[in-house]
Structures are given as structure tokens and as C-alpha cells.
Image (cartoon, rainbow, N blue to C red):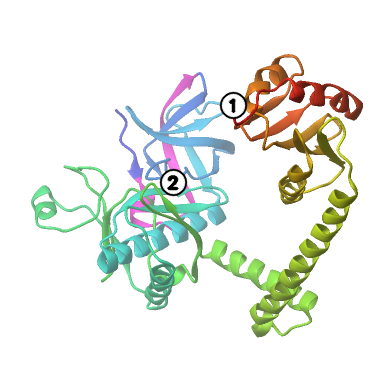
Amino acid sequence: MYYTEKIYDKNPHCHTFSATVLATIDTPKGYAVYLDRTAFFYEGGGQSADSGTLGGIEVLDVRDGKEGIYHLLSAPLPEGKIVEGKIDSSKRFRHMQAHSAEHILSGLAYSLFGAENVGFHLGKTEVTCDYDKPFSYEQIRLLEQKTNQAIWANLPITVTYPTPQELKEMTYRSKLDLKENVRIVTVEGIDVCACCAPHVSYTGEIGVFAISTFMHYKGGTRCTIKAGVDGLAFLGQMQSQLEEISHLLSAPLDQCAEAVNRLNDTANDLRYTMVGLRRALMDVRIANATPKDGCLFFFDDDATAEDMRYLTATGVGKCELACGSFVQNDGEGWRFLLVSSTCDLSMIQPTLRGEYHAKCGGSRSMLSGILPKNKDDIMRFLPALLKSCPSANG
């Protein structure tokens, strides 16, 4: 077992350091290098490891294994050598901002609504927090507001290692039942939580916070958060999109929502008008159509599902056997809807599937699916098949 001093415990802003190589072990994934001290945070607590270099060699990963903290490298480092470590400072600071913001959010979620944090993932492009209770829109906005207020208050964030007796007397959040060497991260007046990761020293270092999306998840709520540099980038993206929308709508930024509502009302009016016109055209088609062999079939290139339902429901009254609507299916056969008030259509399903390779399903009075045949074939075999079909009333 190799003991490694965790520099980030006392100095989370340390980005360069020197250390002595305790051991280098060749593994299938690379060389596991153990140091007497490190500023690299290993993967844990829902957060990925720091990136950077060690002795000029890229650090592929950092883990806390059975023998202690090891740094995975593509080349070995000699035992006893003093090496310089350099951490990707931008990645480290982004992680610190996001993780500290999550502690504030989770502390507030618990104190305000009794919600426990049950999941946390700090990824390359997204940070998510899971809670065991569903939140309303109003509650999400309140949590966002309170989190930002805590950030602007520039509260201290401290790290301690309480004794077992002190832990028994403390109230703190923890996903695991920890007994010893418990690292406690405290956001003054907001949250006390067991955590292994580096954090900012004061909440003001986070800068800005936003909950970009939230959704109901496993009986609770999953929040996607944007903090610090991510939060600023997110707000910048929202500003750019709003400016583009403002330009497209020829509306001031603070009146975009009203302009969109007006546009939506106009679009709905046009949609209703279009539906009316399409139905008028379909009525003309049905009125001028003549059934052939007891069937009335309509073939189209781009009819909607609503069009198909209207054609068959309206046209079936003119048919002795059935009314069908057929629409081109990406150049390979036809999507179809077949309706009958006289035939038991369930009886022809086996033949359509077996002999004509259709994918279909339905009931005694309706069938729908995909028929991989050309128009002439359908006009030939389908009426004959329907004529052999038992009566729906029989």
C-alpha cells in the first residue's frame, strides 16, 4: 500500500507540483505510477479524473486502487525520481465550479424540499444531478435563484476530517455509510456533505449558475446544471439564439415571446385553413371516384395519416367491399389503411403477411401497415382477396 499526500485537500488551486516516484507497475492499460504526493484528483464521486502531464508524459487516468492512488501513463517513470506534475488548470477549475455548485444546489434541495441527492455525474459536456423527489417548474426556478444568491454571498467552503466521535454528532449528507477518514466539505450555512473531490475555496469563484433543463426521472427529478465557465457559455448561447430570434421576428429582445405567440396563432389559423382545403379536395376526389370491383382505392405520394383516415372513413360508404388509402413508402411499396363495413378484414391478414409479405395489423373493420407491392399488383389481387373475405356481420 502506497501512501500519497493529496495536495488538493489543502490547496485545490495547485496546478503544478513536484513529487517522488514511489513505484511504477506495468499493467495491461499502461504504467501505474505511485507518488508520495499529488495534486491530481482521481476518478470518484461522480467526477472524472484530472488531466495533465507527469514528468512530461501525458496522464491517461488517475484512480484510487487497492495499493493507493496511481497515475496511468503510457511510459514508465523510474522509482525514486523527482518529477514535475502539471494539471490541466481549466478542466480542474471547471470541475471545481460545477461540483461546488452541485453541493449548494443539493443542500438547498434538502433544506427547502427534503429532497435527497441520489446521483451526480460531471461529464465533459454535461453535468447532471438526480433527486428523489419531483420538482415543479416554480421549485426549480427557486432553487436556481437561491443557488445564485449563495454564490454571490461568497461563502467559504472548507474541508475537514472529523473524528469518529465528531461524525456521530454531525448532520451531513452522504450516499455511503462511511465510518473513518471521512472528508467533509462544508458550504457555510448551506450544506455539509461527505465528498472526496476538490472544491473552490469561496462560492463567489463559481460566478454564475443555471439549471438548463430538468425532467422527471425514476420517480424524482434529473437536473442538468451549468456552473461557472459552463454557465457563462450557456448564457452566451442563449443570448445569441435570442438575438437571432429577435432579428427573424423583427421584435425587441424583451418582446420575443409575445411575437412567437402571435406567430403561433397565425400558424394555427393557417393550419386549420389548410386542413379545410385539403378535406374539400378529398371530398371532390371521393365524389368523383367510381368503385371498381367493389373497392375504392386512393393512391398518393404524400398524404398524411390524417388524410388517409379521412379518405377511408368518408369513402367506405360508397364501397361494397372496402375503401383503401395508399401512400408511397420511401419508394418501396405502400403504407396503407384499409376500412370495410361489410368484410371481416382480420381474415385476410394471414394471406397478406404470408403470400404478399405485408407488415400489417388491425381489427375486423380496419387494417393498416406496409405492402411491398406495386400499384397494378394491388389493384389486381386485393379486390379478389376481399371478395373471398367473410362478412363482418356473419
Rate crowding at label 2 as few (under 14), some (14 to 19) or many (20 or more) other CA atoms within 10 Å: many
Left of 135 or right of it: where is 387?
A: right
Q: Which residues are magenta?
A: 6-27
The mark total stands at 2
Residue in the image at 84% along x and 49% along y: 286
Quarter of the figure with the C terminus: top right
Residue 269 appears in the rendering:
yes
Determine which residue is flagged by label 2.
Answer: 47
Name the disc covering residue 394, or none.
1
- Residue 19 counted in the magenta span: yes
The kind of residue on which mark 2 rests is Gln
In percent of width and height, residue 284 lies at 87, 55
- 238 to 192, vertically: above or below: below
Is disc 1 placed on a helix, strand or loop?
Answer: loop
Q: Are marks 1 and 2 in contact (CB under 8 Å)?
A: no
Q: Quadrant of residue 64?
A: top left
Q: Quadrant of residue 371?
A: top right
Q: Nearer the viewer, residue 169 or 369?
A: 369
Left of 180 or right of it: where is 328?
A: right
In percent of width and height, residue 370 lies at 74, 30
Residue in the image at 70% along x and 32% along y: 369
Rate crowding at label 1 as few (under 14), some (14 to 19) or many (20 or more) other CA atoms within 10 Å: few
Q: Nearer the viewer, residue 229 or 33?
A: 229
